[in-house]
Image (tube, rainbow, N blue to C red):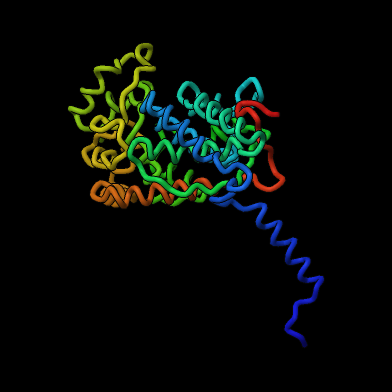
């Protein structure tokens, strides 16, 4: 026997390594093909958030809603003019999903640098990270190399995207199905430390909820009348105290029974996630670390890589 590897086996191993490498995500994916892509995206996102602080929450949510349907493939960006299965028409997205124009603007700038190289799915993933940083939230290394889908899935969006009426069990089961555990779920829910919600999503809670602070409910009723026909689109900050800063005040609110949405307050309602909420309320650094880790984990959901998918020139359309 010889310790030398046969030439044929060397060739096979070489091609296997190329195949594996071409289908994995990497933080350095565009270093050679579009080295200024990340800087360009960051500048574009910072400008958008500077114009409207709420946009940070919208971009993080948009990335989340993308990954939960078919994986992180930019399917949520396809509009109804492109496909009748547009995920924008799911009740969880309709009239609430925002930031499409911001992603389009970032994509247009990147296309000027290196046409047909950087995917919309990657731009959305980077935008979520840059939006977090822009409002004082954590940063993380975004793995890149995703490609864009050629389809959307309205049925899956309706089925798998969380609802503001979801129970704790439904939440846990939904996240588990996506490979995310309870700690991931609570950490990702902490993104509600920024952003706003429409009256229609919290009306029942502030008028009929039992696990809610009375003064908090009365305060929120001022902008959300108990009339199913009035004020549905009126906005209220998810965190009344520091609505534009990415901090851990969201968890302190939950302990005080001041979660705006039912799907928030269920995280601290005598269930299995109470201890995680308490931990994050006391330790902002731990929350930030876990949020960043959960975002990386979520970004690994079923990416299209290698020869799968396409690179869209315009994120809302197919090439």
Q: Please tell me which residue lies in front, 43 or 131.
A: 43
Which residue is at the far left? 215
Q: Quadrant of residue 264?
A: top left
Q: Please tell me which residue lies in front, 268 or 303.
A: 303
| Position of residue 240 measured from the top left corner of the image (x, y, whole percent) | 25, 29
Q: Quadrant of residue 80?
A: top right
| Position of residue 69 measured from the top left corner of the image (x, y, whole percent) | 56, 38
| Position of residue 286 measured from the top left corner of the image (x, y, whole percent) | 31, 52
Residue 286 shown left or right of residue 315 in the figure: left
Which residue is at the far top? 229
Residue 89 shown left or right of residue 189 in the figure: right
Residue 289 shown left or right of residue 89 in the figure: left
| Position of residue 277 measured from the top left corner of the image (x, y, whole percent) | 29, 47
Instruction: Count every numbered label the image shows and give the total.
Output: 0
- Residue at left offset 31%, top offset 27%: 237
Which residue is at the far right? 8
């Amino acid at each position: 026997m010889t310790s030398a590897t046969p030439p044929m086996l060397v060739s096979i191993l070489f091609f296997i390594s190329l195949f594996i490498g071409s289908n994995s995500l990497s933080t350095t994916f565009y270093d050679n093909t579009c080295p200024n892509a990340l800087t360009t995206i960051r500048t574009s996102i910072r400008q958008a958030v500077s114009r409207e602080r709420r946009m940070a929450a919208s971009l993080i949510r948009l990335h989340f809603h993308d990954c939960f349907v078919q994986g992180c493939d930019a399917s949520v960006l396809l509009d109804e003019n492109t496909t009748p299965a547009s995920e924008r028409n799911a009740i969880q997205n309709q009239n609430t999903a925002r930031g499409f124009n911001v992603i389009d603007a970032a994509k247009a700038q990147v296309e000027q640098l290196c046409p047909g190289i950087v995917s919309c799915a990657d731009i959305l993933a980077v935008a979520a990270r840059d939006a977090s940083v822009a409002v004082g939230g954590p940063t993380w290394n975004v793995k890149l190399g995703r490609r864009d889908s050629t389809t959307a899935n309205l049925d899956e969006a309706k089925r798998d995207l969380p609802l503001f009426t979801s129970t704790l069990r439904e939440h846990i089961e939904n996240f588990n199905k996506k490979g995310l555990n309870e700690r991931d779920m609570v950490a990702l829910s902490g993104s509600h430390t920024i952003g706003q919600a429409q009256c229609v999503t919290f009306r029942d809670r502030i008028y009929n909820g039992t696990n809610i602070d009375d003064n908090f409910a009365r305060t929120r009723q001022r902008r959300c009348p108990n009339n199913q026909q009035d004020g549905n689109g009126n906005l209220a900050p998810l965190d009344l105290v520091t609505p534009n800063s990415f901090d851990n005040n969201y968890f302190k609110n939950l302990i005080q029974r001041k979660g705006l949405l039912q799907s928030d307050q269920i995280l601290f309602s005598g269930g299995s996630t109470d201890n995680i909420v308490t931990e994050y309320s006391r330790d902002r650094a731990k929350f930030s670390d876990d949020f960043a880790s959960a975002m990386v984990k979520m970004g690994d959901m079923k990416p299209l890589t290698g020869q799968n998918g396409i690179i869209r020139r315009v994120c809302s359309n197919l090439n």
